[in-house]
Image (cartoon, rainbow, N blue to C red):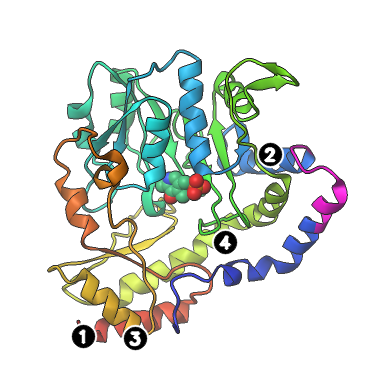
């Protein structure tokens, strides 16, 4: 494949020397759980986002699970309470909700932003609704004043799934002072899965919050439910961040803005160059940086998405689908009640993600656009 969808070795190539040095530093330190690497990583993420409390954890799913479990532990949520989430998301969003004994309630998405359609949220609110979990999907911030107003009206927590949008910001007011995704709501989960805009060299994640009590509970839950050795306050987990990954992330996090800018350049090239009536391009919003292009997702109309992908692959261009089957249609959620989700279900059959990560150059994006314009499918 001349233009693979993603080449992770190329993603990390610019950092090869620094990553190697950081790995050696950890090996020599003798400290393989917790410690200074983790503390420095957490400080770095606090500085980047403006969220005052950061807890490095094992991965993004665990970050979400820990937030929800902590709210249950603190008596803010009870088992059986409902959490509203966008129907178009990665399965982890929903797994975290059901894992905490809460009920996931899907709300359909907006066709343009492909994020939760805020205007549909109120109809999904019941007596048992306790939280909204916006997902900044594909790197685009899902946040507006209506969301904030609804949360305040019904006393709902806002928990951001920020796995795809680290570094994105919004002009709409958050609950706190920071304009950055991950620091807008009550708490947020970030993932450093290797394919994310800033990825570890393995699994890693973080919880971000402005709430010291929540932070303390999450940290304890992630460490066997204990704050001090052999004293278990909660029935917790082992969801700690490995110092070796903290060290890798300390190398890469300072380059977050560059990484996001690099993706934006390619998104612009695609948006300016691809010209086909049967390929609908994503909107580039006017708000600066409110989309960090974790994925560049086009829609192929007329039931020809799969033919498009096959032809594209024949022409040497890799692509992916994020996500082909929405969570509410997965076998594991058979039996879970949900309303009509027509936009999500339609888009699931139309969406295609094009190469946008490092390893795909601006020139490659121009050439891929030319290939798409001439593609016969
Ligand atoms: C990647 C991702 C997660 C989960 O993160 P992991 O680190 O892979 O567990 C959760 N939500 C969304 C939207 C994601 O893209």
Side (left or right) of 50 relative to 129: right
Residue at screen point 41% across, 50% down = 290
The residues bearing labels 4 and 2 have C-alpha atoms spaced at a distance of 20 Å
Q: Alpha-carbon distance for marks 3 and 2?
A: 45 Å
User: Is label 4's Cβ within 8 Å of ligand 1?
Assistant: no
Q: Position of residue 116 (x, y in %)?
A: 28, 42
**CA separation, marks 1 and 2?**
51 Å
First in sequence: mark 3 vs mark 1 = 3
**Of callouts 4 and 2, which one flags the residue occurring earlier in the amino acid sequence?**
2
Does dot 3 land on a helix, a strand or a loop?
A: loop
Residue at image point 56% right, 50% down: 192
First in sequence: mark 1 or mark 2? 2
Name the spot of residue 90 as percent of width and height, x first. 37, 48
Which quarter of the rendering shows the C terminus? bottom left
Disc 2: which residue? 43
Does label 2 point to a residue whose CB lies under 8 Å from ligand 1?
Answer: no
Number of the label disc, if any, that sits on residue 315: 3
Residue 311, placed above or below residue 74: below
């Amino acid at each position: 494949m001349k233009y693979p969808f993603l080449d992770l070795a190329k993603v990390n190539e610019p950092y090869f020397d620094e990553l190697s040095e950081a790995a050696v530093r950890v090996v020599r330190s003798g400290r393989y759980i917790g410690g200074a690497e983790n503390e420095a990583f957490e400080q770095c993420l606090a500085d980047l986002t403006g969220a005052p409390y950061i807890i490095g954890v094992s991965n993004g799913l665990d970050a979400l699970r820990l937030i929800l479990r902590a709210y249950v532990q603190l008596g803010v949520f009870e088992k059986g309470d409902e959490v509203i989430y966008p129907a178009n998301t990665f399965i982890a969003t929903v797994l975290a909700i059901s894992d905490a004994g809460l009920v996931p309630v899907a709300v359909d998405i907006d066709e343009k932003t492909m994020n939760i359609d805020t205007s549909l949220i109120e109809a999904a609110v019941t007596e048992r609704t306790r939280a909204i979990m916006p997902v900044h999907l594909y790197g685009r911030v899902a946040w507006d004043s209506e969301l904030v107003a609804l949360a305040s009206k019904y006393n709902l927590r806002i928990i951001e799934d920020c796995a795809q949008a680290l570094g994105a910001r919004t002009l709409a007011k958050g609950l706190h002072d920071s304009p950055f995704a991950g620091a807008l709501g009550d708490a947020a989960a970030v993932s450093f899965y290797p394919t994310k805009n800033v990825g570890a060299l393995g699994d890693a994640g973080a919880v971000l919050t402005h709430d010291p009590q929540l932070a303390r509970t999450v940290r304890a839950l992630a460490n066997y439910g204990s704050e001090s050795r052999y004293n278990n306050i909660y029935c917790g987990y082992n969801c700690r961040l490995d110092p070796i990954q903290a060290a890798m992330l300390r190398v890469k996090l300072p380059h977050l803005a560059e990484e996001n800018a690099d993706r934006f350049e390619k998104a612009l090239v695609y948006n300016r160059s691809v010209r086909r009536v049967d390929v609908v391009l994503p909107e580039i919003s006017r708000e600066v940086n409110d989309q960090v292009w974790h994925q560049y997702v086009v829609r192929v109309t007329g039931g020809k998405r799969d033919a498009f992908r096959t032809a594209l692959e024949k022409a040497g261009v890799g692509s992916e689908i994020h996500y082909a089957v929405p969570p509410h249609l997965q076998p594991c959620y058979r039996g879970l009640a949900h309303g009509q989700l027509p936009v999500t279900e339609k888009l699931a059959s139309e969406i295609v993600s094009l190469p946008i990560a490092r390893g795909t150059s601006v020139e490659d994006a121009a050439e891929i656009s030319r290939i798409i314009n001439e593609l016969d499918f």
